[in-house]
Image (cartoon, rainbow, N blue to C red):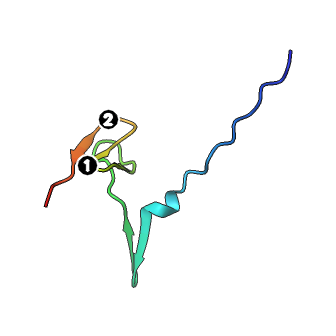
Amino acid sequence: MAKKKKKNKTPSQKWKKYKVNGDKLERAKTCPKCNVFLADHKDRLTCGTCGYMEMKSKK
């Protein structure tokens, strides 16, 4: 049998979820159910693990 080709995986880039303001470290919003980072979409924040969703407010 021929070997399967491995797909190149992109790194997680969790460092983009943190910001430094002066002496304080700010984290991106996390899921209240499972405590993982929420994905930031155009109109909502979603959790890929449990399916939790928050709509962004329109201002």
**Residue at point 39%, 38% (across, down):** 48
**Residue at point 55%, 51% (across, down):** 12
On screen, residue 31 versus residue 58, left or right, reads: right
Instruction: Choose top left, top right, bottom left or bottom right for residue 9.
Output: top right
On screen, residue 54 versus residue 15, left or right, reads: left
Q: Which mark is residue 43?
A: 1
Q: Which mark is residue 51?
A: 2
Where residue 37 appears, as percent x and y from the top left, is 39, 51
Q: Residues within 10 Å of mark 1 (few under 14, many from 20)?
A: few
Give SS at disc 1: loop
The amino acid type found where label 1 is placed reads Asp
**Residue at point 25%, 49% (across, down):** 43
Spatial separation of the CA atoms under disc 1 and disc 2: 15 Å
On screen, residue 6 versus residue 25, left or right, reads: right
Query: What count of labels does the image hold?
Result: 2
Q: Residue furthest right?
A: 1
